[in-house]
Image (cartoon, helix red, strand yellow):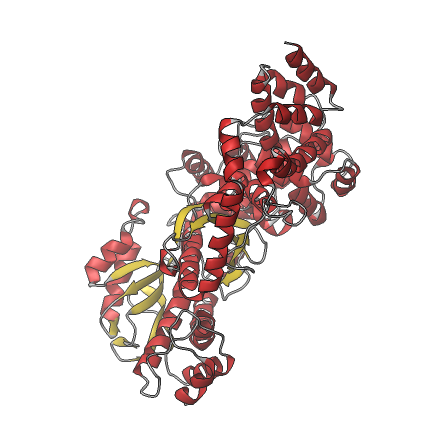
């Protein structure tokens, strides 16, 4: 059956795999008839329920595992009510109930400080190859491993052929759905009130065990205080489950456990007045926006810069605030250390004073956009360089710049960015005689990417960033310096990707990659850096998505595409070699200085600065 189908749809392993709907459907249908499943066990000695996968049957003293793969997943609800999810690799085809008892005893006695080393300890204790905490990616990987092993054991399957990633996912979907159904059955027996406090409405969800267990304290009074705190202030979910190394979070947790007034503790934690926590009381991410998850400090900073009558009054206004004011805070503020520039509060108030719905019309009236605001630091940097070239005081130039409204500054920023693009071909016209600007207008603002459309993995997607504008927007979203990487992509071959949440389109992390210079070697695609919000470390979920994306590129990249990318890169470098020399040794020519001075027309404080420097 397999040979007849794949002969039409599969090619040999020559890095040119194509889609094969018919074969994937046949494989998925055959896999669906297999007996591998997720087994839900009733209570035993030390646990209330257990979920084991991939399993085949239950014996009197053990669970029979599918031994075609070594990957396993185990979920336990202990007698105390706490839950644990473990993913491990083992050689045994049985998981005995006596072994489950020992695992439950060890998990029941674990201390907070042992959480990081617990998986390695369990692996050594029970002779497993590896062990870690369960994740959504583990479900998909186990299902895909099962498909590969079933095909490898099938005599009718030609081993020279291999499934594409897309077909492999489709064939593994029956297994994955069985595992998810087992997880849903496990979740049904949990405390539904606690799940609701954690914001979980879909039982087919892999629960964050740390947050769930936090609400289950051995002292009932403390558990009650914690539940009441979440009922009053849902935005504390991430803080309650945060690492105890965060002193401020630990102090707030202890404050709640002692039964002290909640709003006072939140105000102390966020370093704001009690008016802001009182306003946020009862509001969850579903109302204010999922992009604020884990960013309560910055949310209170933003509200603290606005008068209370400008605070959002409904979900629609929250959405507008997130669309217009949040990017300004992340690009012009200090999201890491919260040392925001003094002008920021006035700028935010200026944008919000006529209502959020009026912001786009006012920007359009000034011939500017939100991107021109969030890239204002780039213009400030250029202004400093120009002031230094004309022997003016850079700090005095910045002070003069900040005399103007944010809308006027956005207008100036737009003019400056347009000029930046224009001078590539105009700064030294003789250097670009063989590069007509009218034919290749986007040559210096965009570049070809390794993928054309976002690549999906679970609940996240990898979005290619192939223009200078997209980099600026990503830098504003994430609060790091990727907005200035356009030249790195244009002349040094970098490829930038944004890992985002599919439902909210919220940027989670940013990746810089490069291709090998040694011809087409897809395995040589390497990650230069991977950063989360404000240059923090990316989450484990983002790291798993990146790992899967690299594996996808290994097989999906076509040599023709790579050759075209490298050809265009060499062409841009050849055409701009003379200009690069000009930039290196004559960064500010007289012509460029005068053109920058012309940009400042209509801004008297800046014009006066330029005139004084010229006279000197």
Q: Residue at x 62, y 36 (%)?
A: 429
- Where, by quadrant of the figure, is residue 1 drawn? bottom left
Q: As drawn, is 94 to the left or to the right of 393?
A: left
* Residue in front for this viewpoint, 321 or 55: 321
What number of labels is visible? 0
Image location (x, y in percent) of residue 250: 41, 37
* Residue in front for this viewpoint, 370 or 266: 370
Image location (x, y in percent) of residue 194: 49, 56
Q: Residue at x 33, y 46 (%)?
A: 112
Q: As drawn, is 446 to the left or to the right of 209?
A: right
Image location (x, y in percent) of residue 511: 46, 49
Residue 606 against residue 145 in the figure, above or below: above
Q: As drawn, is 34 to the left or to the right of 199?
A: left
* Residue in front for this viewpoint, 81 or 613: 613
Q: As drawn, is 179 to the left or to the right of 502?
A: left
Q: Residue at x 26, y 71 (%)?
A: 97
* Residue in front for this viewpoint, 104 or 292: 292
Image location (x, y in percent) of residue 149: 32, 77
The answer to whether any part of residue 526 appears in the image is: yes
The answer to whether any part of residue 229 appears in the image is: no
- Where, by quadrant of the figure, is residue 56 drawn? bottom left
Q: Residue at x 64, y 30 (%)?
A: 305
Q: Residue furthest top?
A: 616
Query: Quarter holding the C terminus?
Result: top right
Residue 537 against residue 381 in the figure, above or below: below
């Amino acid at each position: 059956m397999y040979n007849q189908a794949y002969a039409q749809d599969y090619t040999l392993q020559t890095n040119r795999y194509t889609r094969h709907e018919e074969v994937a459907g046949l494989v998925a249908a055959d896999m669906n008839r297999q007996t591998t499943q997720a087994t839900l066990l009733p209570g035993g000695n030390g646990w209330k329920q257990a979920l084991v996968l991939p399993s085949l049957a239950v014996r009197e003293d053990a669970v029979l595992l599918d031994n075609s793969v070594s990957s396993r997943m185990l979920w336990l609800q202990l007698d105390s009510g706490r839950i644990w999810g473990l993913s491990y690799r083992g050689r045994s085809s049985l998981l005995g109930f006596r072994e489950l008892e020992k695992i439950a005893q060890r998990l029941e006695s674990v201390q907070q400080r042992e959480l990081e080393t617990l998986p390695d300890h369990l692996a050594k204790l029970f002779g497993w190859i590896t062990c870690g905490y369960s994740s959504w990616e583990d479900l998909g990987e186990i299902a895909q491993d099962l498909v590969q092993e079933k095909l490898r054991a099938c005599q009718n399957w030609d081993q020279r052929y291999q499934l594409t990633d897309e077909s492999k996912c489709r064939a593994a979907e029956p297994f994955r759905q069985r595992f998810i159904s087992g997880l849903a059955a496990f979740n049904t027996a949990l405390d539904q009130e606690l799940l609701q406090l954690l914001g979980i409405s879909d039982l087919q969800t892999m629960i964050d065990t740390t947050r769930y267990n936090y609400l289950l304290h051995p002292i009932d009074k403390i558990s009650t205080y914690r539940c009441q705190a979440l009922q009053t202030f849902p935005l504390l979910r991430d803080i309650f489950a945060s690492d105890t190394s965060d002193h401020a979070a630990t102090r707030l947790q202890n404050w709640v456990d002692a039964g002290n007034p909640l709003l006072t503790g939140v105000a102390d934690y966020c370093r704001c007045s009690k008016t802001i926590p009182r306003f946020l009381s009862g509001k969850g991410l579903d109302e204010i926006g999922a992009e604020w998850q884990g960013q309560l400090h910055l949310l209170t900073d933003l509200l603290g810069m606005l008068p209370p009558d400008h605070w959002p009054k409904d979900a629609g206004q929250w959405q507008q605030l997130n669309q217009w004011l949040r990017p300004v805070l992340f690009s012009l503020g200090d999201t890491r250390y919260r040392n925001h520039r003094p002008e920021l509060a006035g700028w935010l108030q200026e944008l919000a004073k006529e209502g959020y719905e009026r912001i786009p019309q006012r920007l359009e009236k000034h011939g500017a956009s939100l991107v021109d605001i969030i890239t204002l630091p780039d213009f400030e940097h250029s202004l400093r360089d120009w002031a230094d070239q004309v022997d003016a005081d850079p700090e005095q130039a910045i002070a003069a710049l900040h005399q103007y409204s944010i809308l006027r500054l956005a207008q100036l920023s737009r003019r400056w960015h347009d000029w930046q693009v224009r001078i590539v071909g105009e700064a030294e016209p003789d250097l670009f005689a063989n590069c007509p600007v009218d034919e290749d207008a986007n040559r210096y603002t965009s570049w070809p990417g390794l993928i054309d459309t976002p690549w999906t993995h679970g609940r996240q997607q990898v979005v290619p960033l192939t223009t200078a504008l997209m980099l600026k927007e990503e830098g504003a979203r994430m609060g790091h310096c990727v907005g200035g990487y356009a030249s790195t992509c244009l002349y040094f071959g970098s490829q930038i990707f944004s890992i985002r949440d599919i439902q909210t389109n919220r940027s989670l992390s940013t990746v810089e990659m490069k291709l090998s210079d040694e011809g087409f070697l897809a395995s040589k695609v390497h990650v230069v850096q991977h950063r989360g919000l404000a240059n923090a470390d990316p989450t484990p979920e983002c790291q798993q998505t990146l790992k899967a994306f690299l594996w996808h590129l290994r097989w999906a990249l076509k040599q023709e595409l790579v050759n075209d990318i490298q050809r265009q890169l060499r062409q841009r470098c050849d055409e701009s070699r003379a200009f690069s020399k000009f930039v290196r040794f004559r960064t500010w020519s007289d012509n460029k200085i005068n053109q920058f001075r012309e940009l400042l027309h209509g801004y008297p404080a800046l014009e006066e600065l330029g005139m004084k420097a010229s006279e000197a």
